[in-house]
Image: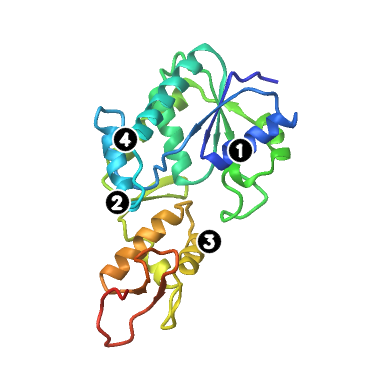
Amino acid sequence: MTHYALHLVLGDVAAGVLGEAMTTGMLVPASVLCFRDIYCLGPLATLGTADGPASRAAYWARLLPDTPPARAEFEEEEARYAQAAEAARRGSVVAWGGAHSSSRLWLQRLCAMLPPQEADLHLVHAVDPATASAGRRTPSQFEAGELAGLLARAHPLDREEIARLAGEWQHNRAVPSGVRRWSRGRITHHGDDYYDALLLSQCDDQWQAASQAIGEAQWECDEFLGDVFFAWRLRCLANSGRLLLRSPDRSLAEALVRLPAAGGAPGTQH
C-alpha cells in the first residue's frame, strides 16, 4: 500500500472523519491538510493573485455581515496550497475528492498549483457507485470504517491529467458567476439567484420558521451550498418583496417567512 505523506481534504467534517479513521487504526496515521473555502460560490478570478484573499473575504462578508471572516483566513487558505504543492514534490500526496462543484474546482486548483512533471498526487474519488447521483458524493458522507476501502482505490494523476485539470481551473475561474454546479461531468455557471425558485418552493402563504425553509432547500439542493448561502438568498428575496420576513430582532434565529398574499404590498416585516 502506498504511504502518503499528506492527506488533502475539503471541509472540516471530512477532515474529522479522516482523523477518526486514523486515530482508530483504520488508516495509517499521516498529516491531514484541511481546505475550507467553498468554490461553488462567489468570484474566483482574483484567486492566485495578491488580491485573492481580500476578494474572497469581501464576498463572504456579504453573506455573513454580522460575523464577517477576516482576510487572514483566506491568506491561510493560500498558504495551504503552497504547502500541498511542496509536499507533492517531496512524497506521495492523496486528495480526497467528490462529485460536486466545490470538490471539483478545489481539485482543479490543486492541480494548477502543481508542476506536473514533479507532482506525486493521487486521487480518492469518494463517491458511492451503488447510489444514484443524489447519493453519497463527498468524503464527509462516508463512515470512518469505509475510508480504507476508498483509499485502496486511489489512483495517481499523471502529468497529462494534472495539466488538463489545471487548464479547467483557469477556464472556470475566469467565468463570471455566482453559483457553480457539477452537472454531467462538468462545471456549469449560474447567477446568484439560480436556487431562488427552490427556496421559494419551500414556502406558502402560512408563516413558518425561516430555518425550516432554509433547511428544506438545503436538503433538496443538488449541490452542497450550505445554510449561509440560503440564509443570504432568503434575505434577498425578502428585500425584493418576493417573501415576507418577520423577525423580532432582525436575525433569522427566530424569524418567520411566508409568501406575500396575491396583490399584497411587498416588503420585509419586522
Tell me the residue that label 2 is attached to. Answer: 62
Label 3 secondary element: helix
**Dot 4 amino acid type:** Arg
Q: Quadrant of residue 53?
A: top left
**Placement of 91 over or under 174, stated as above or below:** above
Q: Earlier in the sequence, mark 2 or mark 1?
A: 1
Tell me the residue that label 4 is attached to. Answer: 71
The C terminus sits in image quarter: bottom left
Residue name at image x 64 percent, y 47 percent: 129
**Placement of 227 over or under 123, stated as above or below:** below
Q: Position of residue 1 (x, y in %)?
A: 70, 20
Q: Which is nearer the eye, 163 or 111? A: 111
The circle on residue 266 is none
Label 1 secondary element: helix
CA gap, disc 4 to disc 3?
A: 30 Å
CA gap, disc 1 to disc 4?
A: 25 Å
Residue name at image x 64 percent, y 33 percent: 19
For mark 1, does the 10 Å Cα neighbourhood hold few (<14), some (14 to 19), or many (20 or more) residues?
some
For mark 4, does the 10 Å Cα neighbourhood hold few (<14), some (14 to 19), or many (20 or more) residues?
some
Residue name at image x 71 percent, y 35 percent: 149
Q: Nearer the viewer, mark 4 or mark 3?
A: 4
Looking at the image, do the residues carrying marks 3 and 2 touch, with CB atoms under 8 Å apart? no
The circle on residue 16 is 1
For mark 2, does the 10 Å Cα neighbourhood hold few (<14), some (14 to 19), or many (20 or more) residues?
few
CA gap, disc 2 to disc 1?
A: 28 Å
